[in-house]
Amino acid sequence: METVYLPMMTRWQFYAMFGVQFVLGVAYCLAMFWCATRDPVLEWKPSPLVDKLQNKVGFGLFIVAAVTSYFSLPDVFYAFVEDASSGASEVIVETATEVLDGTYRAPGGRALQEYLSGVIGGQPNDTQHTALLLMAVFWISLGWCAYTLDFKPSPVGVWKKLVKPVGYAALTALMCLVPMCLHRFSWAELQLPLLLSVVAGACIAASHTYNRVQPPPVH
């Protein structure tokens, strides 16, 4: 089986990926906030224990997001100023070492052709990968923080309560896959994100309460 090689991600490709992740992160937080407050039980008030638990978990997730954003700042900074040349130099050094050791194998014609064509987003180097990963953790923590602090139970059955976590898990998994796992935006790469999108949308729609009768307004 031939190894598929990817060129290093350029600075501008990282800018684009970071921008896509930022937009998806904001949309994810808004979606989690909406999911937390939809179909609330009318006039529901949490018990002191539930209220205390919500606050502790919510602020704990907020602290995780704050710590993650703090530790990601150096990686984000270096990823913004670093270009593919530094990553390419590391590859050259590693290749030269393999040549001297006699362990280097040049890519075949097919692998080299895949290396040179069809790539929209290259392979991130260590700094870029760490920056994107930490920012994904930041948005996921912030989204679940919004969900936890604003959560209100819904008057739904057991089946819908079981379906909700599946949809939320699929929605969260998208934040881990996009944009780090997309390079050519081919069907092979888009299959899993599209499947997760369909599962998340279907589960969230199925667990929603439609045609709910609202009480008359109090005059």
Image (cartoon, grey):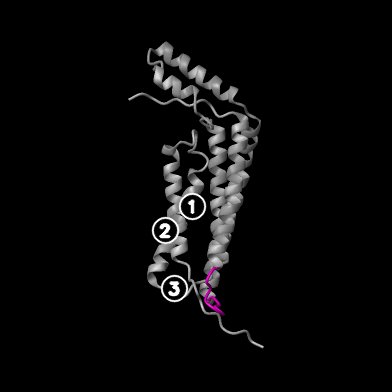
Q: CA distance from mark 3 to mark 1?
A: 23 Å
Mark identifier at residue 209: none
| Circle 1 crowding by C-alpha within 10 Å: few under 14, some 14–19, many from 20 | many
191 sits to left or right of 68: left
Horizontal and vertical percent position of residue 38:
54, 68
For marks 1 and 2 on the same chain, the one whose residue lies earlier in the sequence: 2
* Residue tagged 2: 166
Q: Amino acid at mark 3?
A: Val
For mark 1, give the secondary structure.
Answer: helix
Horizontal and vertical percent position of residue 214:
55, 80
* Residue tagged 3: 156
Which residue is drawn at the image coordinates 51% and 72% (left, top)? 50
Q: CA distance from mark 1 to mark 2?
A: 10 Å
Can residue 193 be seen here? The reply is yes
Q: Amino acid at mark 2?
A: Val
Instruction: Note whether 3 is above or below 157 in the view shown.
Output: above
Instruction: Note whether 152 is above or below 168 in the view shown.
Output: below
* Residue tagged 1: 172
